[in-house]
Image (cartoon, helix red, strand yellow):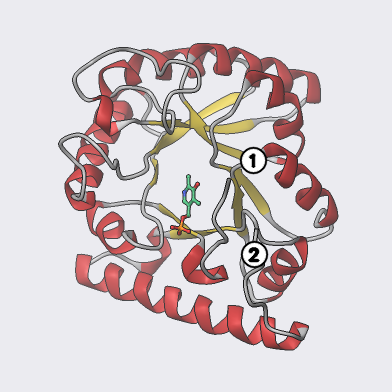
Amino acid sequence: MTEPLEPVTEKDRRDELAANLEAVERRIGDACAAAGRDRSEVTLVVVTKTYPASDVRLLAGLGVRNVAENRDQEAAAKAAECSDLPLTWHFVGQLQTNKVRSVTDYADVVHSVDRGRLVTALSSAAQRQGRELDCLLQVALDKEAGGGEAPAGAGRGGVAPDAVLELAEQVRAAPRLRLAGLMTVAPLAGPFAGRPGAAFERLMEISRSLRTLEPTANMVSAGMSSDLEEAVAAGATHVRVGSAVLGVRPRLR
Ligand SMILES: *Cc1c(COP(=O)(O)O)cnc(C)c1O
């Protein structure tokens, strides 16, 4: 794997991150203004996957308070190195049940809850650790035509829209888990491929039906570097931005 060109000094890197953050901040602000929303309605979650703990530290110094990771092994080490920082850690990757105990050690919010077995595992880990965990159900909008829960290891994970409320009931019934809302990644296939705005509108529709069940489950995590404007326009409360802040990631295996 070739290393990306990194700025040489820590100050260079800080300047680069500051400039990128400012640009993203401007995009979110403009998108809020265009949608008639208050800027405070949208939380920026910076996705730091593949980037080192030193970047997380610089980001915290620049005022970032929410960071996200998608792989437990990398996240656990980074969170441990950064445990002195005032950060909320979000887990946004596909989660295997055997990683749950580790993830609940550092994560405050899990965005990728997509099956009953995971709910059970998260709840027992949270009980064992005596802590409360915010859970978002990851919705797979390319599974619109039914099909129930995501088969293990399939695609990017996520529960089919028609199975969301059933899974929501499971989270609600699980000790130490708080049903916080929904998350999605704009699908690459199916009717929403290439239409992030329409995908996020659909997520908002599902969010409205979720809130008839649980009015406080009002988090909507949607939008990344390429489609945060569409997400803010639709009503997202959390945007997950990686490359626009940290730079384009080296290709993963
Ligand atoms: C990597 C990742 C992001 C950020 O993507 P960018 O395109 O780099 O902004 C957001 N959400 C999830 C689930 C991710 O894995």
Q: How many labels sit on residues?
A: 2
Is 237 left or right of 21, judged from the image as shown? left
Q: Position of residue 16 (x, y in %)?
A: 60, 83
Label 1: state its secondary structure. Answer: loop
Q: Nearer the viewer, residue 24 or 243?
A: 243
Q: Quadrant of the C terminus?
A: top right
N-terminal-most mark, 2 or 1: 2
Q: Amino acid at mark 2?
A: Thr
The quarter of the picture where residue 185 lies is: top left
Placement of 185 over or under 83, stated as above or below: above
* Mark 2 element type: loop
Q: Nearer the viewer, residue 4 or 205?
A: 4
Query: Image point 69% across, 68% down: which residue?
Result: 60
Q: Is residue 21 above or below residue 175?
A: below
- Regarding residue 126, the answer to whether it shows in the image is no
Q: Residue 30: percent from the left, percent from the top? A: 30, 75
Q: Amino acid at mark 1?
A: Arg
In the picture, the disc for residue 2 is: 2
Which quadrant does the N terminus fall into? bottom right
**Residue 83's x, y, as percent?**
82, 53
Give residue 71's mark: 1
Q: Which of 214 and 59 lies nearest the eye of the viewer?
A: 59
